[in-house]
Image (spheres, rainbow, N blue to C red):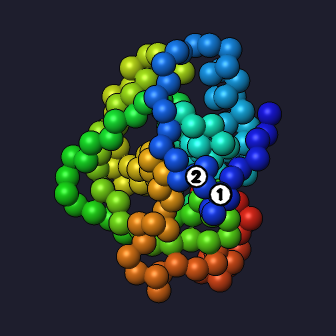
Amino acid sequence: MIRDILKMGDPRLLRIAKPVEQFDTPELRELVADMFDTMKHANGAGLAAPQIGVDLQVVIFGFEHNERYPDAPEVPETVLINPVVTPLTQDMEEGWEGCLSVPGLRGMVNRYSMLRYEGVDQYGRAIDRVAEGFHARVVQHECDHLIGKLYPMRITDFSKFGFTEILFPGLDPKSDD
């Protein structure tokens, strides 16, 4: 089922998500399925449960090709629950980000260029991966939602923040994540 995506300004996006305590439940399977339906419907690269009003530490991400990030390499389709993100370098990379909760806008954000992420999937199976580049950016962006942060809170140069249709003519401005 496609869920409504909360927009910036909704106080629910600023809350801290709670850890998931039970796995492979009908409720968790339904949440994950709804998140994928919602992300794909909006052409997103990822989605966090708080974006649909669910205060749980659940993020999903991944795609082979994404129209909104046409130059981005493939990111493996992932369900990541109760994530722990550890930077593996102090090197930062600037990159353009959008967000389904901040529709029609893009901003330049600094993120760690390489990290390790750990957690579990919806069945409670361990996930432990190293990611770099765009994959690392997506993980950091989605995990920020679990601590009540939206990407505009990380922008340091507001001359690099604006409407997608102006900055990137031809990209879909209605769905930015």
Amino acid type, residue under disc 1 in the picture: Asp
Which of the pair 19/84 is nearer the observer?
19
Residue 134 at x, y percent in the picture:
43, 54
Circle 1 Cα neighbour tier, 10 Å, few/some/many (<14 / 14–19 / ≥20) = few
Residue positioned most to the right: 1
Residue 110 visible here: yes
Total number of numbered discs in the rendering: 2
Q: Is residue 127 above or below residue 63?
A: above
Q: Secondary structure at mark 1?
A: loop
Residue 121 at x, y percent in the picture:
49, 23
Residue for badge 1:
10
Circle 2 Cα neighbour tier, 10 Å, few/some/many (<14 / 14–19 / ≥20) = many
**Residue displayed at 49% across by 68% down:** 152
**Relative horizontal placement of residue 78, taking residue 119 as reference (left or right):** right
Q: In the rendered view of the protein, which quadrant contains the N terminus?
A: top right
Residue for badge 2:
13
Q: Quadrant of residue 120?
A: top left
